[in-house]
Image (cartoon, rainbow, N blue to C red):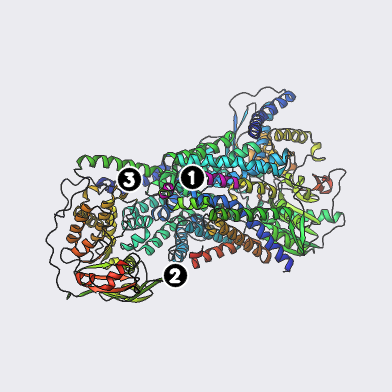
Amino acid sequence: MSATLFGQSVLSGIFAGSLYALMGLGMSLSWRYLRVINIAHFGLVFLAAYMTYEFAGVRGYSALAVALLLIPLFFVLGVIQQVLILRFNVNEFSSLIVTYGLAIIAEAVIQLIWSADFVRYENRALHGNVEVGTLLLPVADILLVVIAVGLCVATWAAMRFTWLGKALRAGLDNPAIAAAFGVPNQRLLLLVSGFSAALASVAGVFVALLYTLAPSQILSWLGVVFAAVLLGGLGNPLGLLAAGMLIGVSEAITMAITAPSWAPVVPFTILILLLVLWPQRV
Amino acid sequence: MASVTADTPVIPTRSAAARFGVPTTLAVALVLLLLLPALGLPPFFESFLYLLCLWISLATSWTIISGFTGYFSFGHGAFYGVGMYTTANLGASLPILVCLVIAAALAALLSLGMGAVIFRVRRLRGELFALLTLAMTIVVATIVLNTPIDGGPGKYLLGVQLPRIYDNSATTIYLLGACVAIGTLAITYFIQYGRLGRGLFAIADDEDVAEGLGVPSYRYKLIAFAISSAIAGVIGAVHAIFVSYVTVSETFSSTVALFVILMSVIGGMRHWLGPAIGAVFVTTINFVFVSGDSALAARIVIGLALILATLFLPEGVAGFVQKQVHKRRAAASSNTDTAPHALVPAAPVAAAPTATERPILLKGENISLAFRGVQALDGVNFDIRQGEILGLIGPNGSGKSTLINVMNGFYKPDTGRLLFEGHDLAQMPAHRIARLGLARTFQIPRPFPHLSVLDNVMVAAMFGGAAYPQETARRKALETLDFVGLANRAGAFPSELNLHQRKFLELARALVSDARLVMLDEVLAGLTPSEITSAIAMVRRIHGGERTIVFVEHNMRAVMELTDRLIILNQGKLIAEGDPRTVMDDPAVIRAYLGTSDAEG
Amino acid sequence: MRGRDIVGATRRFMLAAGLATSAALAATAFQAQAQAPSGPPIRIGSTLALTGPLAQTGAIHKIVGDLFVAQLNARGGLLGRPVEWVLLDDQSKPDITRTLYERLITVDKVDLIIGPYATAGILSAMAVAQRYNKVLVHSTFGIPKMAAYDRQFPAWPLGIDPEKTMPNDLLDALASIGKTPKSIAIVTSKFPSVQFVAVGAREVAKARGVKEALYLEFEFGTRDFGPIAARVREADPDLLFVGAIGLEGNQLLEALDKLNYKPRNHFYVYPTPGPLATSPLGNDAMATTAFENLPPLNKNPEAAAFAKAFTEAATKAGLPYTEPETQAGASWSMWEILTGAIKATKSLDDKVLADHIKKNGSDTVLGHISFDGQNNYGKNLMRTKQVQQGKWVIIWPKDMITPGYTVQGK
């Protein structure tokens, strides 16, 4: 195997891992801070992807403008979902079903509007690639890595260094005491859910940029994103990023050096070994 | 005095009718299901009922490990898949019943292999267990895909020979499914109300406490996982014949894992019948809305149905029913309730504390334990003598609770031995220590939140030193609750008790199994002065002149009143030992308590 | 504004879906002016994957079935009776497919059944049909050697050994312009109905002396094609043979494009036609097809009318790609085979129909389909097509080449 092939495969794994992290970030936050296992997150991702296709692809608005409009819109959607979840006092297990129900509905609505057939958003502006030595870095993927890493790091920093993050973590440890210190818990939770949904819209824009869309793909990301979210540690953006990269890169290298159909074995075996041999670090 | 009085309120136990009624009902249901084909119903109903049986078996089996035990599995598809591929590969050459047995065995082996590794690591519960099982499913699927087990083209089951019972092999599949489903329900029912189930529910609520009360958690989890997986393997083996064409993407799709979870949560995960209710609900709505002209509307209706069912029945159908029953019973019993809790009767005269020349019950030698560089215990040597009340005191962070945790097996000391009747407790898992007759309470009460007060005590009675059989355990538990004054709260849940009552529940759990050494960790903390008085009387009654008690306490009045001897810890070291009055005058002790530094002294 | 657009789109779609059938009915009623059918309807039952992972193709089959039945009734129905299509949604799941076919036969008591969509579902339905001795005409069954029931008839004329004919036709087409590849890279999804074709292609290549530069199998559902693309680029074959189903071809092409690599000659087994034709990367891509709305196939007036009606209905239903091809063609021919046999025999008896179909074959929009070989598979009627200037044209066999076009090869 040549060095180029190896390098190119590692890059490919980094791109894939970035998308896993970007898709998982909102999930990870809502799982940790809201105790909501949000399967509907994937529904939102695809809803955003289809809206990107519709407005940027079919109607020709600027993709950036579409993305900037989707973010606040999805923030509101996320807040609405959380208001319902709080109103009905949904626990962690039940949230799995409620959000699965929402995902089913999202799939049906997408199919109703855009049909079950494949659609593709062609964006020529982000086409092409940058050459680094013998390696090729596609522009769209570079943008993905920058945004994914940027958002993960920013979220991590916000959680760690701002009053907001501290208040959130305090609220998680002891809601009553946090409330006594004036932490408006409910509003914080709504903020997290809105932010998670806004992250879903960003992930959706990239799904539209990089993939052909079909409504039935909504849950096809579930397994691998779940794995990255859990391996990274709930509510841990940097861990998530590392986990996404680990899965993406190890899979890509396996595909480059052996039969690609064996690829899933490697990251998931690594994952099992990590958990069993090194549980305190995960 | 310690007997169940006539006006002991209704205890939420299964009536005799329920105890014999359920197995009978299941048997009758099975006979009816088996006779159904004779009625000549359209075969569609057999097929539909078969699918109900499939999902009932899968969801119910999932609940054994995940609902009962609290280990949330996202890998049920793997065991089901193992079963599918067993028939796909062996069905043509072996009789079907042999295939089913092999499928069960392979699935159970896979889960035992996994469990043997995972269950050793305490952290691997909750989400991490879900992740591990998800990862395992993917690994198994990939192996099947890339080896001759499948290889890629899928397996078409051509030569599977089925016994023809109603002259129709399709009916035979239905009969097999019915047997597996009813069998699964029966197994789950007996697990829930048997020893295993009580242990599993305790593990689900608080694994450490369960282990400390004597539940062999590692073994029980393995057993639960193996039973759960074996059932999934069996029904998978049957289902392979039903679909007749087995492919990797269909078999190992996340649908199976997701569906069993949905069904169990909708029906209720902590009851043997819950998942079956959920399975019937979800499968039926999937079949009611199949009209080709409104396929999408049907999906939306199904999504809404799932959401509404969950919003209005957050604990599932079974959980809702259990709660209603509990409410009704509570209302009924409150009519007969005379006081919030019975007053502790006056203490009998305790045998006067005498000499230190009693035989040694437990001997600690050079116990040391460090956490990340902090020396929590540093070469502690001590004796506990038969029949004494030993006070264990020291400032906050001195190592008292750590020492208790070492003695009951929660922590393994880095060095040292704990000799108890020839056993070294330092090398023993907590549940075996409990079985030897050591019991403890927790400073902050840790009752099993989802078990009634009576069930909380019964777990201790069945798994602790005395290891009573179920019926005896129930009687002993009621007696003990009466003894601590909680008899009229037996049917309540711990969340309905006040702190004082929860502390007494802790006591009841420690006492019910006739422990020979009871370690009381700050039972008085947080109580009002009058409650303290009654609690001191209670401790004296527990002692009864002969039971050995280790008494960890800050309340010096209680310490001086109760203890025969004191040992004092400071910064992990034993700094004094002996008669209470002498020890309390020891300058080292005064320094430790008053915080006067050595330099100043 | 955003919200209104969505609402508008929804409303338009629903209107279109609702009107599509009636519009087609009205249009054909004008032409035919046949006498209205009367009496109890003849009920034909089937399921389709209308939701779930196969829904995108299931939708095509639903459009075709609705069109065909509307047209049939407008022309007087069958045996003077109207025809009713009892359609259920199998959610793309084989076990539900099986149970619903049992429902159709034993509860709804339909007169006849017709096939669902996709190989696994058809196998499930076939087992039920066999138990009740029902005729089962089906489209799009991908593994001919598994179809071992004597009253099943494939409307998709693959021949019994597509794993040989498909790669041979491809190599013949390239050879006809003197571009016989010296090396071949075979990359395939481990999806049952394409994997065996790739394995067959491997043997064909060996037999015809084409050097195998690369053979790879990947998991169905693979998302990251980067490493596979890097290996293809490194192997740099004359011919890239992709055992692709659905979108996998596009995914691989896009991954290759990111490496600035364009395959010289490339073939995909069962790609979704729209995305490949409309993608700028799809140029010269080859695939197999049973039908295209192109001469000589659409010289047949029946075929031309079908193609026109399909495109109209698909446009109204909002499908992004509205050209009829293998799926729509095979689906239409499935209906033609069954209803043709009913007309010819004036019978609804499964045995009579099966005997007639087996003996006579059927004239369909795909050509004359025969059922005289192993597993009722007759002559292979599959054609090789290629994307040229953004649309599919047929390039092989010789008598089917779209006028004005030739094989493009490098």
Q: Which residue is mark 2?
A: B372
Q: Is residue A194 magenta?
A: yes
Give the structural element (helix, strand or loop) at label 1.
Answer: helix
Please determine whether, in this image, residue A76 is positioned above or below residue A13.
above
Give the structural element (helix, strand or loop) at label 2.
Answer: loop
Return the residue nearer the eye: B105 or B313: B313
Give the structural element (helix, strand or loop) at label 3.
Answer: helix
Quarter of the image where one finds residue B511: bottom left
Q: Which residue is mark 1?
A: A97
Return the residue nearer the eye: C386 or A164: A164
Residue B41 image offset from top left, x and y in percent:
45, 38
Q: Is residue C197 left or right of residue B307?
A: right
Q: Residue furthest left?
A: B349
Q: Amino acid at mark 1?
A: Ile
Residue B472 image offset from top left, x and y in percent:
22, 57
For disc 1, the neighbor class at 10 Å (few under 14, some 14 to 19, many from 20) is: many
Return the residue nearer the eye: B525 or A236: B525
Magenta region = A177-199
Q: Chain of mark 1?
A: A
